[in-house]
Image: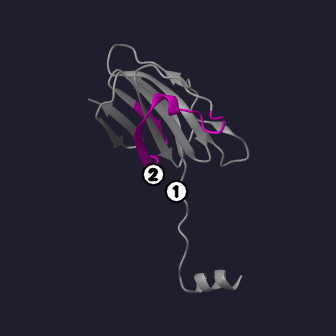
């Protein structure tokens, strides 16, 4: 109790955790994938992994993907449902797996994780390619060249 009083007396306030970015849409296109959020996630990372290592968080069950290369994307803090109120509100009602119409490097996109404010998606590609993660407002656009 005294430590809290000392912190408040010193004028120091702990920073509030960033809001959870709520996913509302995913579009798989031949050369890019667009993730739409209500607010932008604080951190977005992408890393290539062997396809055999693409697994669901929690169960560890393998997630098969079309293509020969797998890029795993992580969004934090982010989720497909709003847990902040008294009832669960699903914000992403789309499929867990998408395939783009047309031909391009993107073969398939699959959700791998939505747990404890970490959202994960894997992108199956024709081969390892240079990728770019860009933000446009609350959207995250991953393009492949």
The percent coordinates of residue 8 (x first, y second) are: 60, 81
Residue at (55, 75) in percent of width and height? 13
**Quarter of the rendering containing residue 111:** top right
In the drawing, what numbered circle is on residue 18? Answer: 1
Q: Which residue is mark 2?
A: 42
Q: Position of residue 24 (x, y in %)?
A: 52, 34
User: Farthest residue in the top direction?
Assistant: 102
Q: Nearer the viewer, residue 45 or 62?
A: 62
Estimate the x, y position of residue 118 in percent, counting from the top left. Answer: 55, 45
Q: Is residue 98 above or below residue 114?
A: above
Figure quadrant of residue 10: bottom right
Q: CA distance from mark 2 to mark 1?
A: 7 Å
Give the class, few, some or many, for how many residues have Cα within 10 Å of label 2's Cα (few <14, many ≥20): few
Left or right, residue 128 beside residue 86: left
Q: How far across and down, in percent of the image, does residue 39 sit?
A: 47, 46
Badge 2 or badge 1: first in the primary sequence: 1
Tell me the quadrant of the picture where the C terminus can be found. top left
134 vs 96: above or below: below
Residue closest to the eye, 55 or 119: 55
Secondary structure at numbered mark 1 = loop
In the image, residue 43 lies in the stretch drawn in magenta: yes
Magenta span = 34-60
Name above or below for residue 105 compared with residue 58: above
């Amino acid at each position: 109790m005294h430590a809290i009083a000392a912190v408040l007396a010193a004028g120091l306030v702990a920073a509030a955790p960033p809001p959870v970015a709520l996913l509302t849409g995913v579009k798989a296109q031949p050369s890019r994938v667009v993730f739409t959020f209500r607010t932008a996630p604080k951190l977005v990372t992408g890393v290539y992994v062997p396809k055999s290592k693409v697994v669901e968080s929690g169960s560890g069950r393998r997630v098969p993907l079309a293509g020969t290369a797998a890029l795993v994307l992580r969004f934090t803090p982010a989720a497909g449902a709003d847990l902040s109120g008294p009832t669960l509100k699903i914000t992403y009602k789309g499929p867990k797996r998408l395939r783009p119409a047309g031909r391009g490097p993107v073969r398939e996109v699959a959700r791998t994780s939505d747990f404890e404010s970490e959202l994960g998606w894997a992108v199956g590609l024709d081969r390892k390619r240079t990728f770019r993660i860009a933000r446009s407002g609350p959207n995250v656009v991953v393009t492949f060249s």
